[in-house]
Image: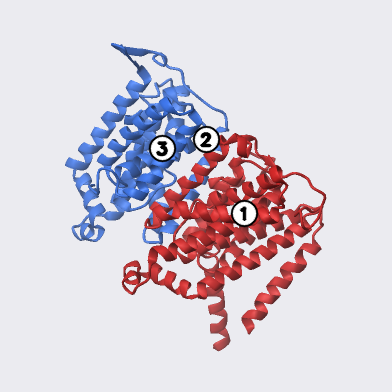
Chain colours: A blue, B red
Amino acid sequence: MGGVYAVISIGLTLVYGVMGIVNFAQAEFLMIGMFVSWFAWAYLGLDPVLAAPLSFAVAFGIGWLVQGQLIARVLKAPSVAQIFLTVGLLIVIENGSLLLFGSQFRSVTTSYQTMSLSLGALFISVPYLIAFGMSLACGLALWWFMRTSWFGRAMRATAQNPMAAQLMGIDTALMYKIAFALGVGLTAFGGAVILPYVTVFPGVGGQFVVLMFTVVVLGGLGSVAGAVVGGLAVGVIQALSSLFFPIQLQNLILFIVFIFVLAVRPQGLVGASR
Amino acid sequence: MKRWIAILAAIAIAAVLPLLLSPTGYWIRVLTFTLLFAAMAQVWNIIGGLANQTSLGHAAFFGIGAYTSTILVLKFGISPWIGMFAGGFLGGIAALIIAVPTMRLQGHYFALATLAFGEVMRVIANVWTSLTGGPVGLSVPFVPPSIAAYSFKQLLPHAYIALIALIIVTFIFEAIRRSAMGYRLRAIKENPAAAEVIGIDTTKVKLQTAVISGVLMAMLGTLYAQVAVFFDPDTVFSAASISIRVALIAILGGVGTAIGPILGALFIIPVEELMNDLFSSGAAGLSQLIFGVILIAVILWRPRGFITVFDSLMARFSNKARS
């Protein structure tokens, strides 16, 4: 699970790292990704995991519009306005999908759903393994993009110093659009990948929102490498707490870890590196 | 002088209004909740507006207040009036517990931490079944109507209690804003480092506002419990319908001003009720969707709230009068 947590959270951390905005609506894009993939499965017969790039593309498009039309206007506004713009976005997306798709739970059936591989005494469920593999591939692709491509470098420059980046001829508004679209796209990708073992409904984002924020805060807001570490850490915390505590208390443990980390080490476990 | 006349006139209108509404009707309920939410937003405004710390966890204190007074009635038969202060005390302690580690955090980080705290309280209330009844919720027991027992046949007294609560918290807000503490808070807001240098104990001042806000919010929780009569953890500890909503009301009206939360509540609560009414037969989620759209529109159009509309109208008016 940890690897998937990392991918859905990298999007959040990317948006924060480049623009300094905490997107409270991020988990809604997870839901969008899951729905796109579900429809691709139901009507096109596409395997949900193969539909992941499609989910990415749809969320990328929506993210592009949202950034250009809405968020760009509050980039310089007080943080209260930024917080509540994304909260408003959350309300709109969640209820919009409730209107469009109804409140029923949807899930997919795949041939490999119940399969598991045995590695000695260890059993690994195949859908989890596929999700992990896809997440890993996606994370590596992003890493490669940010390191080597011109866009990646320009985006990192914008994150460090928007003014200087602009003086170097970088279109920072475009960079923000790419960063936001890429961020929500990745989260949607993660949504598609987990569809084989998570049912989708309009409120599904709410189940992941704390988890995503915990991952990101554990790793340090804005740090992509941190999100990977945080994702794995949260996966481990969940697995361990399920051994010792009843299921209702698992989220509680996560919340407490979250507040604790915020209070003690708000820069995250990995430090302030971007 | 003019100011006082305006304030007294507003109070007089608010005092007469409940009498004009049908005492058993629907609108008196809307009015009561509008007044109550205005008071809650005003309390949020103490920390969110004056100390500039965007809390998204005020449901925690609110729920503590609702549960404390109701549990005291249920188990010991103690009047909610006393329970209200017990709840306030616990709310203050809860505020201290969350504020001590998080007050150094700013902006988004503080919002996230308080949001998580509200959720912690919700989960605890759901799990601690022996005390709270768990997800089933609690009903305020019926007792013969009397003022001492905080029990009334009709909603009218509740509307007046909510009005009085709103007036009290608004005065507290103004008193803090104008006090030395208010000036310290403003200094911190403008420039925390400079405030620290001139000898303001920034953490202490912020902690004070957090505790005051927590105490008052918990006391309002009791008022809510007495009006609503029934509640469960997911209503009183709700992030969306309590924490975010009260912050929203203050923000839409105008953060950091005494009139802002009142304007915001007068707008949001009736509009919400109206939309629920109009669209409840239609598709689920439509009223919430429209609500979200209004929120986004207002933030883009007036990031500092409705109050700026009035300000610019006033400015235009006085300019015209001069010329």
Along the line of sight, the residue nearer the viewer: B161 or A215: B161
Q: Position of residue B161 (x, y in %)?
A: 71, 61
User: Left or right of B173: which side holds A163?
Assistant: left
From the image, tell me which residue sits under label 2.
A202
Q: Residues within 10 Å of mark 1 (few under 14, many from 20)?
A: many
For the residues labelled 2 and 1, the Cα–Cα distance comes to 39 Å
Q: Callout 3, which amino acid?
A: Leu
Camera-nearest label, 2 or 1: 1
Q: Do the residues under discs 3 and 1 have CB atoms within 8 angstroms?
A: no
Question: What residue lies at 70% left-to-right and 45% top-to-bottom?
Answer: B76
From the image, tell me which residue sits under label 1.
B86
Question: What residue lies at 56% left-to-right and 77% top-to-bottom?
Answer: B314
User: On the rendered image, what quadrant is the N terminus of chain A found in?
Assistant: top left
For the residues labelled 3 and 2, the Cα–Cα distance comes to 17 Å
The secondary structure type at the circle numbered 2 is loop
**Chain of the residue under the numbered disc 3 shown in the image:** A
